[in-house]
Amino acid sequence: MSDRLKEPRLFHLNNGTIRVSITNYGATITSLFVPDKHGELADVVLGFDSVQTYMEGNPCYFGCIVGRVANRIKEGKFSLNGADYSLPINNGPNSLHGGNKGFDKVVWDVVEQKDGEQPSIIFKYESSDGEEGYPGDVTVTATYTLASTNTLRLDMEAVPKNKPTPISLAQHTYWNLGGHKSGNILDHLVQLSASRITPVDENSIPTGELLPVKGTPFDFTSEKKHAAKVKEPSSGRVLNLWTDAPGVQFYTANYVNGVAGKEGAVYGKHSGLCLETQGFPNAINQPNFPSIVVQPGEKYKHSMLFEFSVE
C-alpha cells in the first residue's frame, strides 16, 4: 500500500442528508451533520478542528475506535491458556481502552472508499503480537457506511491469526444532538434497553454481579429491543442505536473538563454522551460475563446502526 494512504488524513461521506468526516487516525469520527426538525444541519459530535489535534492528544477518546479491549481490565492483568499477560496501567490501577497506544492512537490503512447512494469507507489495522501486552497478531477492519438516507452504520471485525486473544472494540463518539457546542446534554431524553447493570468497585471494576436496574438510577429501560434511544427536545433530533453487542457503556462526560474543541467550543462536564456498545468491562477476568476471547481463525464481529430522525 502506498505511503500516502498511511498518512493521517480526513475522509468524507455524504448522502445529501447526513454528512460525516472520519480520519484514519484511530478510525475516528470528527464531525457528523444531521438535520433538525426545521431541516437545519448541525454537527452533533464532539471533536477537534484538525487531525493534528487528535494526534497531539485525545485523552477523552473523542470519536475514535478503542481496542484491542475497550473499557477497564483489572490491574492490567489476565491469564489465558496458562499464560499470564501484563498490560500498561493507564487509568488508576487499571488498563483502559487497549493501553497507552491503543487502536485510537494508530494510523489505519484505507482499504477502499466508495461513493454513490451508500457511500462507505473501509479502514484496516494490523495489530501485532505483544502490542500493548496482548497476545497474537490480529487483523482489524472498520467499515463506515451511510446505509440509508438517515443511517450511519459501523461494522467492526477482527480475526486473530495465531493465538487466542481477548477482543472487545468500542466506538467512543460523544453525542450532543443539540449540536456539539450547544451546552450540556442534561435535557436529552435517554432510553437504554438494559435490564441489568454491572456494579463496580471503587476502581470502576465490575464486581461480577449482574443487578437488576429496576428501582435504581440506572433504570433507562423501555419496551424496545434495540440498545438506545436519545432525543434532544429543542431541536427534535432523535438517535436510535441498534447493535449486536452484549452491553453498552453509557457515559455522560463526567470527567470532561475545559477541553478546547472545534469551532472555539469549550467542552465541560456533561457536554456530550457516549453509547459505547461493547463486551462487559473486565470480562477477561470474570468467568460469568460473556467471553471476549476470540480463537485464531474465528471472527469477532460488532455492528452499530445509528439511525437519525426528528420528533
Image (spheres, rainbow, N blue to C red):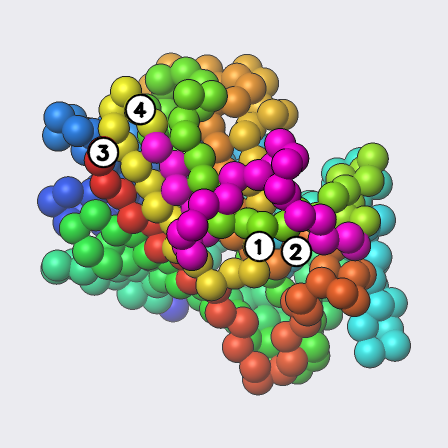
Q: Mark 4 points at which residue?
A: 233
| Kind of residue at disc 2 | Phe
Please say whether residue 120 is one of the residues in the magenta stretch.
Answer: no
Measured as percent of width and height from the top left, residue 169 is found at 55, 57
Q: Nearer the viewer, residue 148 or 197?
A: 197
Eye-nearest disc, 2 or 3? 3
- Looking at the image, do the residues carrying marks 4 and 1 touch, with CB atoms under 8 Å apart? no
Mark positioned earlier in the residue sequence (2 or 4): 4
Eye-nearest disc, 2 or 4? 4
| Residue 223 in view (yes/no) | yes
Residue found at x 82% / y 78%: 81
Mark positioned earlier in the residue sequence (4 or 1): 4
Q: Name the residue under label 2.
A: 280
Task: Determine the secondary structure under disc 3.
Answer: loop
Numbered badge on residue 247: 1
Measured as percent of width and height from the top left, residue 162 is found at 66, 82
Q: Nearer the viewer, residue 71 or 185?
A: 185
Eye-nearest disc, 1 or 3? 3
Task: Determine the secondary structure under disc 4.
Answer: loop
Which stretch did the figure color magenta? 208-231
Quarter where residue 168 is shown: bottom right
| Kind of residue at disc 3 | Glu
| Residue 109 in view (yes/no) | no
Residue found at x 47% / y 21%: 186
Mark positioned earlier in the residue sequence (2 or 3): 2
Q: Mark 3 points at which residue?
A: 311
Measured as percent of width and height from the top left, residue 114 is found at 21, 62
Mark positioned earlier in the residue sequence (1 or 3): 1
Mark positioned earlier in the residue sequence (3 or 4): 4
Circle 1: is it few (<14), some (14-19), or many (20+) Cα within 10 Å?
many
Q: Which of 115 and 252 is in front in this view?
A: 252
